[in-house]
Amino acid sequence: MAVVIPLFNGAAHIEEALAGVCAQSAPPQEVIVVDDGSTDDGPDRARRFAGRLPLKILQKANGGQSAARNLGVAEACSDWIAFLDQDDVWHPQHLANLRAAADNGPAQTGWAYCDVSVVDAAGRLLAPSLLHRRPGRHPKQSVDECLAQDMFVLPSAAL
């Protein structure tokens, strides 16, 4: 499994995001941070994790999160890709739970996603189970259901 993190001027958050990757009970085989033209020291802060994670840092001119994610996916060797935004933090079981959901789903499962909680900068829980407060049923079970209802799947919550 690969983790792809787009990074743009994220020095204030990238270390916490990467610490959350380090804390995973099912660690990834590769972590790809795509520096999307940062002008702060975020990439240097990310490099500090090189001994703790199988880390690759790519650099590109600023083109936005989607372009950074696409470059990370193109460079990944893993069959499964998990996205993590620079200012998000995963619970320690995040990757294990998503992988279990994918492995235990129908034979043609191509992706899995989970609920999210919103916390403030001090770590106080502001909104638990944000996904279940949205309209529609979760988890979605078909492409038709995905297209007919509000998807509201955040990149950091998908595999």
Image (cartoon, grey):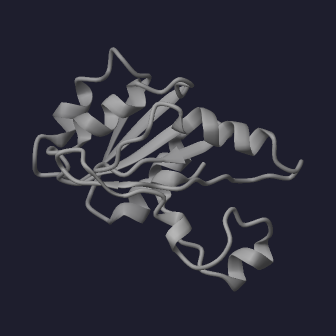
State the residue lying farthest toward the right. 107
Where residue 19 sits: x, y (%)? 32, 29
Q: Quadrant of residue 56?
A: top left
Residue 70 in sight here: no
Describe residue 60's horizontal placement relative to residue 110 as left or right: left
Give the residue at x 40% y 22%.
Answer: 53
Residue 6 in sight here: yes
Describe residue 46's horizontal placement relative to residue 6 as left or right: left
Where residue 20 sits: x, y (%)? 37, 33
Q: Is residue 127 above or below residue 97?
A: below
- Number of labels in the image equals 0
In front of the other: 129 or 19 = 129
State the residue lying farthest toward the top. 51
Q: Quadrant of residue 13?
A: top left
Give the residue at x 41% y 62%.
Answer: 67
Q: Is residue 127 above or below residue 80?
A: below
Where residue 64 sits: x, y (%)? 33, 65
Give the residue at x 62% y 38%.
Answer: 97
Quadrant where the image shows the N terminus: top right
Give the residue at x 52% y 42%.
Answer: 75
In front of the other: 76 or 143 = 143
State the residue lying farthest toward the bottom. 148
In front of the other: 69 or 87 = 87
In front of the other: 120 or 34 = 120
